Image (cartoon, coloured by chain):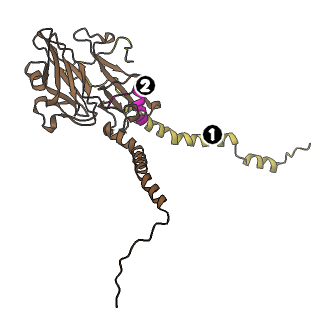
Chain colours: A brown, B yellow
Amino acid sequence: MLKLTVATPPADPHPGRARAVRRLRGPLSAIVALWLAAAFAPQALAQTCGPAINLAADQWRMVAVSCVPNANKTISDFFSPSLGAANYGVTWIVWKRVYNNPSCVVASGPSDCYVKLTLTSPVSTGDAFWVYSTLATSLQFNNSQATTTPGPYFEFPAVLSTDGNSRYYMFGNPYAGTVNWADFGFPIVFLGFLNFTLSTQQAVNNSIVSKDVYYWNGTNTYFTRDLTTSPNPAATFTSKQAAWLEMLQPSGLISNVRVRVPQP
Amino acid sequence: MAVDSSPEASRQENLQPDPGRREFVKSSGRALYLAPTLTLLGSVRATAAIPSSPPPPPGGAAPAAPAAPGPNQ
């Protein structure tokens, strides 16, 4: 006759040890999680500050610094790891557009000009640069130089035209993600004391900014996109991309215009 | 010390190649290889020179060079 029995697990000879293992399970999980976070942190930061930029040989390229540079960071800190400090001025060079700079007064227009930078020139959030390389190479900024993201927006003052000639501002998208031009803001002062933040469409309608934004085609000329057609993908501002914004001459009742780039 | 001035010894001496001449030929041969190579490198380097300034802004105005080193330099 078959005898059915129910198997019971053998009695734990060390019940205290099992309790100790259960008690350690929580802290062990936390330690493993911390280790995983530390192991993958560099990759996470690299993605946070945007992808690498491919430089074509013997071509000018407009590039932007991603994220918020740490204090006292320089051109060398960002560019030299990829392009080599010893080759500066030999195989690559960096220029920047400056505004209201007394050192570059132009008799027929605003005091804006290009300045050739040195390896010790400072780097700030939203900076855009002209980079020229005689070699085809990949430019990946050293993300240990800039680890935070500007938020909830990045903005800069944009002086309006006063003589009928447009003023062109070269700046970059400091975010890892794509920004829609239609989401930009334009804080202004109206009548000298009323503060408003206009949308892109309102800024265009009030002749504060041209509807055309200018991008360098990578070889020999600029092409434009309509600011007001976003979310059309062609009129977006991608990470590390630099562009020219054309400031116009609106009514004299509008002053203190700033350009606000929202965090995507 | 006796000096061998026999015709045979003199003939042996004339058969020895001139060491100076041999070095000259070797270095000339090197130059023959080096000269075109350097010329080629020179021509490549000339085309890879960095332009004096970036393209002008979209408005078409020529970029003005600073009169003196600015604060960003």
- Residue A39 is situated, as x and y percent measured from the top left of the image, at 42, 46
- Residue A167 is situated, as x and y percent measured from the top left of the image, at 20, 17
Residue A227 placement: quadrant: top left
What chain is tagged by disc 2? A
Which of the pair A144/B9 is nearer the observer?
A: A144
Residue A212 shown in magenta: no
What chain is tagged by disc 1? B
Please indicate whether residue A171 sits to the left or right of residue B4 in the image.
Answer: left
Q: Is residue B3 above or below residue A191?
A: below
Q: Which residue is mark 2?
A: A119
Please indicate whether residue B8 sits to the left or right of residue A242 in the image.
Answer: right
Where, quadrant-wise, is the C terminus of chain A in this rendering?
Answer: top left
Q: Residue furthest right?
A: B1
Residue A18 placement: quadrant: bottom left
Q: What's the distance in space between the residues labelled 1 and 2, CA to CA?
A: 47 Å
- Residue at 22%, 9% in the rendered image: A108
Q: Is residue A142 visible?
A: no
Q: Amino acid at mark 2?
A: Leu
Q: Which residue is mark 1?
A: B24
Secondary structure found at label 1: helix
Which of the pair A47/A216 is nearer the observer?
A: A47
- Residue at 34%, 91% in the rendered image: A1
* Mark closer to the observer (1, 2): 2
Secondary structure found at label 2: loop
Which of the pair B35/A38 is nearer the observer?
A: A38
Q: Which residues are magenta?
A: A65-83
Q: Amino acid at mark 1?
A: Phe
